Image (spheres, helix red, strand yellow):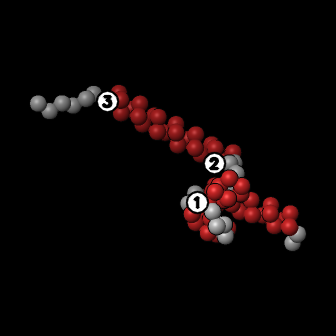
Amino acid sequence: MDHITAHMLRHTYATMLFDAGVDIKSAQRFLGHADVEITLSIYTHLTKYKEEQAIQVLDKHLNERNNEMQKPLLRVL
C-alpha cells in the first residue's frame, strides 16, 4: 500500500469512528496519535450524516424546551 492510500484510509477510519459516536480518546488511541488535537484537527472530518444527526439532536432539544416552557407552573404554598 502506498503512502497516499494509507493516509486516505486513516482519514476515512477516523471519520467513521466519529460518525459511529466513538469517543475521541478511544479514536486517538486506535489511530496511535500522541495528541488528541491531531485526531480532531487533521484526521476527523464532519460528514453530512453527522451534521444531520447534530441538527436532529438540537431540534429535539429545542422542542422539548418549548414543551416545558408551555406547561403551567405548579406552586406549593
Image position, residue 54 (x, y; %): 58, 44
* Foreground disc of the pair 1, 3: 1
Q: Residue furthest left?
A: 77
Secondary structure of residue under mark 2: helix
Is 13 placed above or below 72 here?
A: below
- Name the amino acid, label 1: Ile
Specify the quadrant of the image occupied by residue 71.
top left
Specify the quadrant of the image occupied by residue 18.
bottom right
Residue holding disc 2: 50
Q: Residues within 10 Å of mark 3 (few under 14, many from 20)?
A: few
Secondary structure of residue under mark 1: helix
Q: Residues within 10 Å of mark 1 (few under 14, many from 20)?
A: some
Residue holding disc 1: 24
N-terminal label among 3 and 2: 2
N-terminal label among 1 and 3: 1
Left or right: residue 26 versus residue 43 is left
- Name the amino acid, label 3: Lys
Image position, residue 7 (x, y; %): 80, 63
Is 35 placed above or below 74 here?
A: below
Residue holding disc 3: 71
As drawn, the label of residue 60 is: none
Q: Residue at x 63, y 48 (%)?
A: 50
Please tell me which residue lies in front, 13 or 72: 13
N-terminal label among 1 and 2: 1
Specify the quadrant of the image occupied by residue 4.
bottom right
Image position, residue 41 (x, y; %): 68, 53
Tell me if I can see residue 15 in this picture: no
